[in-house]
Amino acid sequence: MFESIDTPALLLDVEKLERNCARMRERLHSNGVVLRPHVKTAKCVEVARVALDAPAGPITVSTLREPEYFFDHGFRDILYAVGMVPGKVPRVAELTRRGARITTIVDSVEAAQSLADAAKKAAMRIPVLAEIDSDGHRAGIAPGDPRLLAVADALGDAFQGVMTHAGDSYNCDSIEAIRAVAERERDAVVKSAAALRAHGHPSPVVSVGSTPTATFAASFRGVSEVRTGVYMFQDLVMAGLGVCGVDDIALSVLGSVIGHQRGKNWVVTDAGWMALSRDRGTARQKVDQGYGVVCGADGKPIEDLVVIEANQEHGIVARRGGGAIDFARFPIGSLLRVLPNHACATAAQHGEYHLLRDNDPIDVWERFNGW
């Protein structure tokens, strides 16, 4: 069934993609919040259209290459959710002149002032959100920090509200812990927006987002939109968190068996880290999936086989914890599929999706990389 596909290759099960997207849309719409999908993983207009109800957005991006591409395909409402710097203003300004609404983010007074100055120089009003640090995970202004008001002051009428990303949800060991992170995420931005409004800064946008918290949050009260991205594809990290089942994972990497190391009980494939990525996100979880769970050509996991090592063009398949392998089951040239630890990192290794429906190849969708 895969004879026409050169390995290694990125496979996308369309039925699982559609099911994952429909599930998230229904959940968020039923809670009265806007879904603003993050398209940094997809980097493909066809995938984004499956995720969205409306063809023009809203979407979230993490590189400026993404809004340029998606604008050319009809998307207009775009949040660039990485800290903005003056040197990137000309590209944002050009998209704005062409009709896009690009909202940016900052998390310091210095960044806010430099962005305001650059926007003024470009004769352009660029909407801005303040990033709130809801969990000490990465970036943002802590709730209650007086610098938040100074940021809004520096931006004037370009200031639109607040956003946060609950990255700590990826470190949770239970659904209850994810729900607690989700409530902390919501509370941080809702209280920050209330403080801003009390000081005369309208804050219509109150934005949260991560796939775990979007999936398990008990409440979205006070939130205007939810940003989430990996839910479209799911992956082994999400499965380890209880966000999805292994059978919900829509992406896999197709590889060919190129060798046997009988003395080591290894099967060697042509899907190394250039095809899988070096991401080992499950190493911190209860079950370490190595570099990915190994499946047959039908996409079903094979007993306890995982990719235990990955070189640039070689993937080493073995039993979890060691053990004998029946090499007759894996002749040279036979095909295996590997489910990814991290959909974002694995997809980034490839320039196209080979679409499957009922496990049969039906089409190819191009995806892009770069900044």
Image (cartoon, rainbow, N blue to C red):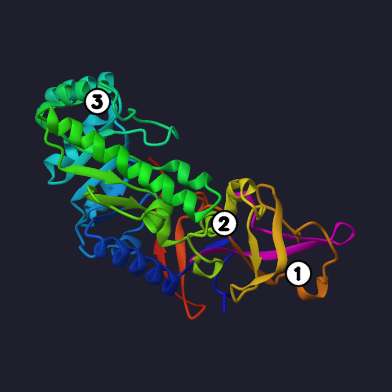
Query: In this image, 186 relative to 247: left or right?
Result: left
| x 45%, y 60%: residue | 352
Magenta highlight on residue 197: no
Instruction: Give me the C-alpha separation between circle 3 and circle 2.
Output: 36 Å
Q: Magenta segment range?
A: 250-273
Position in image of residue 361 (x %, y %):
49, 76
Q: Please tell me which of labels 1 and 3 falls first in the chain.
A: 3
Label 2, on which residue?
A: 240
Residue 154 visible to an observer of this rendering: yes
Label 3, on which residue?
A: 148
Nearer-the-camera pick, 161 or 97 = 161
Q: Quick one: SS at disc 3?
A: helix
Answer few, some or many: residues within 10 Å of disc 1's Cα (few below 14, many 20 plus, some between 14 and 19).
some
Label 1, on which residue?
A: 332
Query: Amino acid under label 1?
Result: Ile
Q: What quarter of the picture does the N terminus occupy?
A: bottom right
Position in image of residue 344 (x %, y %):
47, 51
Magenta highlight on residue 266: yes
Query: In this image, 203 relative to 169: left or right?
Result: left
Of badges 1 and 2, nearer the viewer stands 2
Nearer-the-camera pick, 143 or 283 = 143
Q: Please tell me which of labels 1 and 2 falls first in the chain.
A: 2
